[in-house]
Image: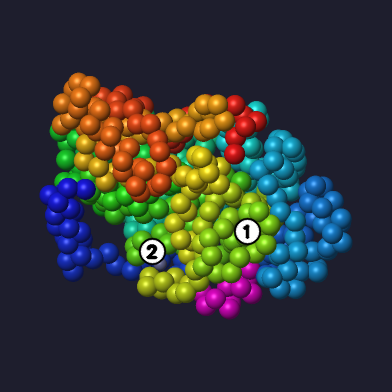
């Protein structure tokens, strides 16, 4: 970030903080969001028992697993008893494709979504009419928590269709009492024009697509910092603090992280408040645990591990101890916003995304953070992993900014600098390939950050 940009951002933030523009504290569901923890935990226990009852009575796989452990739903007497319950994994969904984990017959399902797996069959998830309704309230709550208000125009650039992002936010925006622009992803020039012409205050999309919008606007000579945009709700892919700063600067918004996954409900599971200090996980809907991913043992508050979630209200697809493969830490101390629900400290990456390069663990977001600090390269990148002999080699493809002169000599100088920074800040040796402006494919939704060319069986 250049000093000049920093100053401009400071000026914008300062404007946000002047009394006239200070956002009023607003809760979509005040009583639920600020409920004392003791009361919240009593509600969780009651709902956990109902969820396990639902799974036991209606999902043969869950019934068989509980029977094998000689557990009946009525045996659950405290929240700690959740630790006795079996985990559910992504492969359970795949193995029982398409409806095996559903607790309602297909005729009672109001909505289906699906996510395309990298291998083989997609994951199909379902909602009853009541599930859809509760999901809408949950997203309305997230939108308000992040700074959206009834009456706002909300530009929803999450993809519509089988992906839960577009329709999930769509229903939540309507429930909040805001105006939804259901634009979906793609045709970015038109998106820029409509943000300006229609006067959206809130932008919803993936962080990588937000960056794409910023770049297209700059190329078209449109300064979105002068538009009416003030808030961005970005999620559905892991991103670094450095990318957050970049997007805040270039769009002139407060960038709010939100988290969800279709197996649990889609977006709406957790969201940052205006304090931007961890994501509030909604405990009246979900029970959160953090475990050691190798042993499955629960970890104490504050320790980093794999996030495990049980749903507490889902009728169609009750999930018991779903292993998300996302890495996070939990804190329960009260937040300055007044909400009592725990916070997930920013999910840095998925276990699945982690690369092991010559014994060193690397997340793409770490490389991203290095690149964003360097003025000669744009914040677009891809990581290519290959096996040469017995060793994994990492190539980082970056893109020079237009200010870097064309030609091999300049590219080599940039490559050396990037290589040096990656080595000194992450501790790995990577090849660096410098491409010309525009050569790295832009995100139209979920960004492709890693091309793993290693043979499948040999992957760490
Ligand atoms: Zn808060």
Image quadrant holding the C terminus, namely top right
**Rendering coords of residue 64 (x, y %):** 85, 51
Q: Sequence-wise, which precedes: disc 1 or disc 2?
A: 2
- Magenta segment main secondary structure: helix
Q: Residue at x 35, y 42 (%)?
A: 422
**Rendering coords of residue 419 (x, y %):** 33, 37
| Pointer 2 local density, CA inside 10 Å: few below 14, some 14–19, many at least 20 | some
> Ligand 1 near label 2 (Cβ, under 8 Å)?
yes
Determine whether 411 is above or below 315 in the image: above
Between 238 and 273, the residue placed more toward the observer is 238
> Ligand 1 near label 1 (Cβ, under 8 Å)?
no
Q: Is residue 146 left or right of residue 194?
A: right
Which residues fall within the magenta stretch? 34-44
Disc number at residue 277?
2
Q: How many marks?
A: 2
Tell me if residue 20 can be seen. no
Q: Residue furthest top?
A: 407
Quadrant location, ligand no. 1: bottom left
Q: Residue at x 31, y 43 (%)?
A: 421
Between 19 and 153, the residue placed more toward the observer is 19
Q: Is residue 190 left or right of residue 7?
A: right
Q: Which residue is mark 1?
A: 292
Q: Please, what secondary structure does the residue beneath circle 1 have?
A: loop
**Rendering coords of residue 97 (x, y %):** 72, 35
């Amino acid at each position: 970030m250049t000093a000049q940009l920093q100053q401009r951002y400071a000026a914008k933030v300062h404007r946000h903080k002047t009394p006239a523009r200070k956002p009023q504290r607003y809760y979509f569901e005040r009583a639920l969001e600020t409920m004392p923890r003791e009361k919240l935990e009593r509600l969780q226990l009651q709902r956990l028992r109902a969820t396990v009852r639902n799974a036991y009575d209606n999902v043969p796989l869950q019934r068989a697993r509980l029977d094998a452990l000689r557990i009946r739903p009525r045996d659950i007497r405290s929240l700690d008893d959740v630790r006795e319950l079996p985990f559910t994994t992504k492969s359970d969904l795949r193995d029982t494709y398409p409806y095996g984990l559903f607790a309602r017959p297909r005729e009672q399902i109001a909505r289906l979504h699906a996510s395309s797996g990298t291998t083989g069959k997609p994951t199909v998830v379902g909602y009853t009419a009541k599930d859809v309704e509760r999901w809408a309230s949950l997203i309305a709550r997230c939108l308000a928590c992040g700074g959206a208000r009834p009456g706002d125009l909300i530009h929803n650039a999450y993809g519509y269709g089988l992906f839960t992002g577009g329709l999930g936010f769509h229903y939540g925006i309507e429930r909040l009492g805001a105006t939804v622009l259901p634009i979906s992803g793609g045709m970015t020039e038109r998106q820029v024009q409509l943000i300006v012409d229609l006067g959206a205050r809130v932008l919803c999309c993936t962080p990588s697509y937000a960056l794409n919008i910023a770049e297209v606007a700059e190329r078209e000579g449109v300064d979105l910092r002068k538009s009416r945009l003030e808030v961005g709700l970005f999620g559905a892919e892991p991103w670094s603090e450095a990318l957050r700063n970049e997007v805040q600067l270039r769009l002139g918004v407060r960038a709010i992280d939100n988290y969800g996954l279709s197996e649990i409900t889609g977006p709406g599971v957790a969201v940052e408040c205006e304090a931007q200090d961890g994501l509030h996980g909604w405990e009246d809907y979900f029970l959160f645990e953090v475990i050691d991913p190798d042993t499955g043992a629960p970890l104490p508050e504050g320790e980093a591990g794999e996030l495990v979630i049980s749903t507490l209200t889902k009728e169609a697809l009750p999930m018991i101890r779903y292993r998300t493969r996302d890495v996070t830490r939990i804190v329960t101390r009260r937040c300055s916003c007044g909400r009592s629900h725990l916070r997930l400290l920013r999910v840095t990456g998925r276990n699945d995304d982690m690369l092991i390069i010559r014994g060193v663990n690397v997340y793409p977001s770490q490389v991203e953070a290095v690149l964003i600090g360097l003025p000669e390269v744009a914040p677009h990148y891809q990581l290519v992993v290959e096996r040469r002999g017995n060793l994994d080699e990492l190539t980082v493809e970056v893109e020079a900014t237009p200010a870097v002169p064309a030609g091999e000599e300049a590219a080599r100088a940039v490559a050396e600098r990037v290589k040096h920074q990656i080595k000194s800040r992450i501790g790995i040796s990577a090849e660096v390939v410098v491409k010309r402006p525009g050569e790295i494919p832009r995100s139209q939704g979920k960004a492709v950050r890693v091309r793993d060319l290693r043979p499948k069986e040999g992957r760490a």
